[in-house]
Amino acid sequence: MAFVPISNAATVAALNEHQRKLREEEEQMTGYSGEDLEGWEFKIVRTSTRKFENPEFVRRVCEEEAKAGGRCWRGSTTTASASSGV
């Protein structure tokens, strides 16, 4: 993601809101207790484009994660992968 100097307060507010929503989505996708996470590793794959709307792109990302023993869950703008035995 490239950062461009911004002087418009409304644009800054919109960017902050977008980042807040991304963090919220990550929390919803990974809402586990400490005990639940024992022995697991999570990876969140994100793109600033609409690539996750393309099933072929999602398939390739998940296929790559599967080679390392991961499993995929798809969110609205992300794909999360989890691997056990870390």
Image (tube, rainbow, N blue to C red):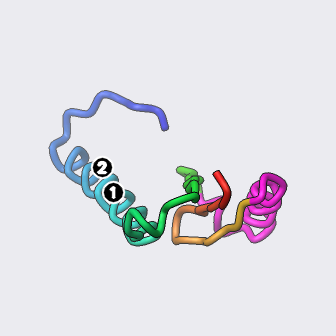
> Residue 62: within the magenta?
yes
Point out which mark residue 5 bears. Answer: none
Q: Residue at x 64, y 51 (%)?
A: 86
Residue marked by disc 1: 18
Position of 64 with respect to 21 (left or right) is right
Q: Residue at x 72, y 67 (%)?
A: 54
Pointer 1 and pointer 2: residues touching (CB < 8 Å)? yes
Q: Quadrant of residue 72?
A: bottom right
Position of 21 with respect to 44 (left or right) is left
Q: Position of residue 9 (x, y in %)?
A: 15, 44
Position of 15 with respect to 72 (left or right) is left
> Residue 83: within the magenta?
no
Q: Is residue 52 above or below residue 49?
A: below
Position of 65 with respect to 80 (left or right) is right
Residue marked by disc 2: 15
Q: Position of residue 85 (x, y in %)?
A: 67, 57
SS label for mark 2: helix
SS label for mark 1: helix
Q: Residue at x 70, y 67 (%)?
A: 71
Q: Quadrant of residue 81?
A: bottom right
Q: Main secondary structure of the magenta part?
A: helix
Amino acid type of the residue that numbered disc 1 sits on in the rendered structure = His
Which is more toward the observer, 3 or 46?
Answer: 46
Amino acid type of the residue that numbered disc 2 sits on in the rendered structure = Leu
Label 2 crowd bin: few (<14), some (14–19), many (20+), radius 10 Å: few
- The segment highlighted magenta reads 50-69
Spatial CA distance of label 1 from label 2 is 5 Å
